[in-house]
Amino acid sequence: MAGPAKARQRPGLQGPYPSVSFSILKSLHASTYSIHVAAIIRMLSPRLVRSHHWFPTMAARGACAVLVLIFLLFVLISHTSNKSISSDSVVETRERMSNGLDEEGQGDAPVETNKNAGISDDTVSSLLERIKVLEDELSSMRTRMDDAENREGNNGIPDEMAVPLPTTKSFPSVRYRNEETRKRVLITGGAGFVGSHLVDKLMLDGHEIIALDNYFTGRKKNIEHWIGHPNFEMVHHDVVNPYFVEVDQIYHLASPASPPHYMYNPVKTIKTNTLGTINMLGLAKRVKATVLLASTSEVYGDPEVHPQPETYWGHVNTIGPRACYDEGKRVAESLMVAYNKQENVKIRIARIFNTFGPRMHMNDGRVVSNFIIQALQDKPITIYGNGTQTRSFQYVTDLVDGLIALMNSNYSLPVNIGNPEEHTIGEFATIIRDLVPGSTSEIVNQESQQDDPQQRRPDIRRAAEQIQWRPQVLMKDGLLKTIEYFRAEIDRNKRGGKPPPEPVRHGGLESRR
Ligand SMILES: O=c1ccn([C@@H]2O[C@H](COP(=O)(O)OP(=O)(O)O[C@H]3OC[C@@H](O)[C@H](O)[C@H]3O)[C@@H](O)[C@H]2O)c(=O)[nH]1
């Protein structure tokens, strides 16, 4: 009788396994199998898992693995309690059986051995192979899960250094443009009344915007809804100092525009319109950008030609209280034309007439903001002088459309951008009071302003012919929108405990003489 077959050594392991330690090995296999099962559940039904949060933490996964382990241990123990089974023992058993030996190597292996084992060799082999396959799958899944957890968790940053990612801010949806049609645009005065509406229009149209402002009259809240957007950059900078950036277009709007604001610091107003304009022309020359100057109907001064065509040279007092702005803008126009002729800089010049709309300063001091705030607060509506002087008022979105049409044209001579609908200031006071429901404001006359232009109305034939632009918004419709804006601003101030806004007189700000 052949001696006991020498137990085949399992490569890398010493001697046959006693049944007890083998069961421990099997239970370890069972536990990895149970984690396989847990991993498979998690990987194959992530939506189910996540939506029911069945596996929100490793603890939950561990608990599930233990349950699966207990089940498998039961299965394995019930099958292997009379006979320890390993790949070696399967081979050994197979050899003994073929040699007629039982597991102790004594005599013919009793037939009941098969019965005692309870499961066939083939079943054991296929189980072992299955477990091997699952082990391989598990290790690759575990690798992927670890990677996924790192990615999901802290983007690979160690826990102690991980910071909560900022909640994403929602932005108005902007048009997609590819590199060919997307322009890089610099807007000086970009946080101002007109500038911020221009930012809105160009951002929504899918361009890249740099808004540059010193916040003398501009306000961050006018553009805060774009801060953080990848196409938008806000730069706190005074245009009287040079600024370098690669852009395709420059809208040069930076300047105080209402009489109280530009009379507050006349020297600064002149510097902004001269040095600021020189800096923007120098930048335009350097980067071959097109530069548009926001000029003004004030270049016509107190006009002796009515309505005013662009060919009218104007009537301006070079040393009056308005000269800092009127002459500032006139020399800015001269600088534009000089750079165009001498340096071939591409220029555009918009002569902007009285403009109104949301985001005007509460203490802007101009007639539209003053009259609306007075009517909303039932305060006297203050007419400077006898109220026979005239103005023509355009809504801000019409102006923005005109500026963009001019920039994208090839026209480099000055163009009037304004609404030819003309009213006396006296009529205007009554129109606004009547548009504010329930206003009890009375209309009062105060002293007139020095060098106050007595008439103003744009001749806009050139705009219609050269850039196909005409105003679209009726003055009354624009006034209703602006009234609602100021009503909300007054309420916001009240909620914030701020005193009601006091309309400012021309020259009313303590000017820095
Ligand atoms: O409370 C007020 C304010 C103004 N006015 C009068 O209303 C008329 C318009 O005055 P505004 O201050 O609104 O504006 P102005 O017409 O003087 O200049 C303005 O319009 C042209 C723009 O380019 C300039 O940026 C801006 O200065 C003036 O005759 C002024 O005396 C009042 O009667 N009461």
Image (cartoon, helix red, strand yellow):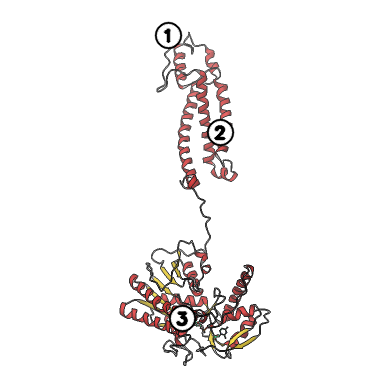
Which numbered disc, 3 or 2, marks the residue that appears first in the sequence?
Answer: 2
Instruction: Report the residue marked by disc 3.
Output: 266
Task: Name the image quarter holding the N terminus.
Answer: top left
> Which numbered disc covers residue 65?
2
Residue 350 vertical placement versus 94 (above, below): below
Residue 335 pos. (x, y %): 37, 80
**Is the residue indicated by label 3 positioned so its CB lies within 8 Å of ligand 1?**
no
Q: Residues within 10 Å of mark 1 (few under 14, many from 20)?
A: few
Task: Report the amino acid beneath label 1.
Answer: Gly
> Which numbered disc covers residue 3?
1
* In contact (CB < 8 Å): disc 1 and disc 3: no
Which numbered disc, 1 or 3, marks the residue that appears first in the sequence?
Answer: 1
* In contact (CB < 8 Å): disc 2 and disc 1: no
Task: Report the amino acid beneath label 2.
Answer: Ala
Nearest to the observer: residue 277 or residue 79: 277
Residue 388 pos. (x, y %): 57, 91
Q: Residues within 10 Å of mark 3 (few under 14, many from 20)?
A: many
Query: Is residue 454 left or right of 285 when viewed as pictured?
Result: right
Which numbered disc, 2 or 1, marks the residue that appears first in the sequence?
Answer: 1
Nearest to the observer: residue 54 or residue 344: 344
Q: Residue at x 46, y 22 (%)?
A: 87
Q: Report helix, strand or loop for mark 2.
A: helix
Residue 393 vertical placement versus 88 (above, below): below
